[in-house]
């Protein structure tokens, strides 16, 4: 009975937090769309339209998830509060209702879209390295298959019933493992860029590779929430509903934060890979008697964000490089 009481309270608190987080998500979505519309950079019209449709898909999927949870609470506690056995009896007895299917399918769609964007960002940050992306892509496909199996298994029951809970935990575990891997890859790449710039005595631009940038690009809170949710759900601890909502809503917030940085022009790009990780070749001039360093010209160019990039160019390109 105590466990049932904890679950009901957790569901109520989770619904309240879900509405707050969704409000934040709406603000972030509309702000990002506004930045994309007024953007005058080289970003093409097709790219802007793609991002806007992507944002709309995330917002719509999350709206369906919020609606299903809100409808569940309304039906449990208001419309059918006199149901024999109480609210929890109604919850377990009406698991074939529309809100059960809509809720889980919306969260799975949000996860799919978020993981897809994280894969693409990892691909960009690692300068389109195919070997690096093999394992993340395989894990992404596995997580997608498990999501479908979870949805099929939960048909006619609740997603949190004993018949389907193992699939839920397995799906969340694989998804969280994928995000842990992507977090590690992205963080390692950005920290490597920071260390490389510091070795060149160049101040690392915080908007690209600072702490906040690494947290956003790697979506670090998402796998952390996923791990907590999976552990609590596996142990059937009632408060897992709160973490389920935080995890499900952050699945939509994380990609929106990345697109927001893209729209502001502070997200990592292929140009940054070429600037930071390109090899610096030193050319020397040789004579019959001595070998001296050739002259170099240092070009300091100011970027739009105020950071500086240093390029070394040989005055005479006719000499071979070492």
Image (cartoon, rainbow, N blue to C red):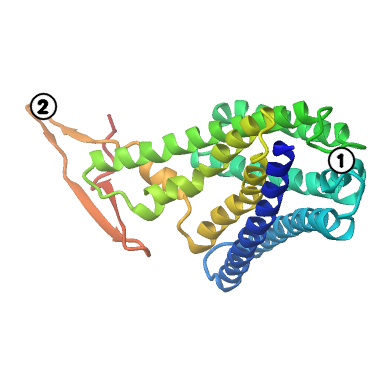
Q: Is residue 143 left or right of residue 195?
A: right
In the rendered image, which quarter contains the N terminus? top right
Q: Which of 224 and 13 is in front in this view?
A: 13
Q: Is residue 128 left or right of residue 290?
A: right
In terms of secondary structure, where does tag 1 sit? helix
In the rendered image, which quarter contains the C terminus? top left
Residue at which label 2 appears: 288
Callout 2: few (<14), some (14-19), or many (20+) C-alpha neighbours within 10 Å? few
Callout 1: few (<14), some (14-19), or many (20+) C-alpha neighbours within 10 Å? few
Residue at which label 1 appears: 92
Rendered residue at 22%/52% (across/down): 298
Q: Which of marks 2 and 1 is nearer the N terminus?
A: 1
Query: Residues under labels 2 and 1: Cα distance?
Result: 90 Å
Q: Can residue 105 be seen in this view?
A: yes
Q: Is residue 287 left or right of residue 30?
A: left
The answer to whether residue 129 is above or below residue 108 is above
Rendered residue at 16%/40% (across/down): 294
Rendered residue at 78%/36% (across/down): 160
Q: Which of marks 2 and 1 is in front?
A: 1
What is the x, y in percent for residue 162?
81, 28
What is the x, y in percent for residue 78?
84, 60
The answer to whether residue 96 is above or below residue 208 is above
Q: Which of 244 and 136 is in front in this view?
A: 244
Rendered residue at 26%/50% (across/down): 203
């Amino acid at each position: 009975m105590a466990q049932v009481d904890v679950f009901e309270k957790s569901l109520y608190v989770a619904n309240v937090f879900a509405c707050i987080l969704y409000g934040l998500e709406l603000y972030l979505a509309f702000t990002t769309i506004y930045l994309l519309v007024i953007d005058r950079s080289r970003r093409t019209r097709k790219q802007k339209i793609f991002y806007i449709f992507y944002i709309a898909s995330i917002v719509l999927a999350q709206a369906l998830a919020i609606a299903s949870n809100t409808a569940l609470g309304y039906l449990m506690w208001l419309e059918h509060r006199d149901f024999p056995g109480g609210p929890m009896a109604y919850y377990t007895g009406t698991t074939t209702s529309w809100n059960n299917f809509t809720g889980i399918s919306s969260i799975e769609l949000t996860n799919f879209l978020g993981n897809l964007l994280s894969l693409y960002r990892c691909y960009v940050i690692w300068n389109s390295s195919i070997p690096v992306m093999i394992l993340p892509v395989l894990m992404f496909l596995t997580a997608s298959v498990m999501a479908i199996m979870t949805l099929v298994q939960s048909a006619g029951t609740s997603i949190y019933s004993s018949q389907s809970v193992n699939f839920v935990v397995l799906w969340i575990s694989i998804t969280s493992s994928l995000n842990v891997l992507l977090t590690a890859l992205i963080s390692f790449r950005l920290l490597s860029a920071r260390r490389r710039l510091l070795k060149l005595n160049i101040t690392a631009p915080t908007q690209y590779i600072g702490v906040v940038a690494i947290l956003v690009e790697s979506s670090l809170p998402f796998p952390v929430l996923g791990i907590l949710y999976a552990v609590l759900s596996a142990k059937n601890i009632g408060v897992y509903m709160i973490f389920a909502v935080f995890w499900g809503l952050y699945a939509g917030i994380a990609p929106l934060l990345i697109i927001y940085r893209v729209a502001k022009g502070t997200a990592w790009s292929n140009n940054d890979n070429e600037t930071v990780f390109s090899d610096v070749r030193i050319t020397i001039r040789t004579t019959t008697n001595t070998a001296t360093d050739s002259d170099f010209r240092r070009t300091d160019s100011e970027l739009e964000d105020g950071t500086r990039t240093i390029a070394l160019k040989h005055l005479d390109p006719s000499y071979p490089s070492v």
